[in-house]
Image (cartoon, grey):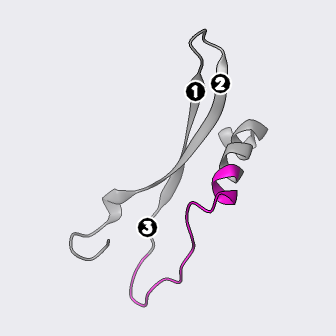
Amino acid sequence: EALTDPKWTQAMEALEKGVTWELVPLSIGKSTMGCRWVPAIKHKVDGSVERYKTRLVANGYTQSYGVDR
């Protein structure tokens, strides 16, 4: 639902433009780790909306101890 809202897509584009991560080639024999967008609305003290904020979060439960870093 958030992906269709222009306010949220602007917040996601801001992370991409800020170069907060980089794509690298996948090593041979390794599998990818999933991720998802986590949206949040930041409010002012009076209750009005201050900004729309998103985070890209890795699904860490797919990691293997000693293998994935």
At horizontal 44% and vertical 87% (from top left) the residue drawn is 27
At horizontal 66% and vertical 39% (from top left) the residue drawn is 2
Q: Nearer the viewer, mark 1 or mark 3?
A: 1
Name the disc covering residue 42, or none.
1
Magenta-colored segment: predominant secondary structure: loop
Residue 52 seen in render: yes
Residue 1 seen in render: no
Q: Earlier in the sequence, mark 2 or mark 1?
A: 1
Q: Nearer the viewer, mark 2 or mark 3?
A: 2
In this rendering, position of residue 26 left or right of residue 3: left
Mark 3 crowdedness (10 Å alpha carbons): few <14, some 14-19, many ≥20:
few
Mark 1 crowdedness (10 Å alpha carbons): few <14, some 14-19, many ≥20:
few
Q: What secondary structure is found at the residue carrying circle 2? A: strand
Q: Earlier in the sequence, mark 2 or mark 3?
A: 3
Up/down of 35 relative to 69, above or below: above
Disc 3 designates what residue? 33
Q: CA distance from mark 2 to mark 1?
A: 5 Å
Q: Position of residue 24 (x, y in %)?
A: 54, 79
Q: What secondary structure is found at the residue carrying circle 1? A: strand
Disc 2 designates what residue? 50
Give the residue at the far right of this rendering: 6
Q: Earlier in the sequence, mark 1 or mark 3?
A: 3
What number of labels is visible?
A: 3
Residues rendered magenta in the picture:
14-31
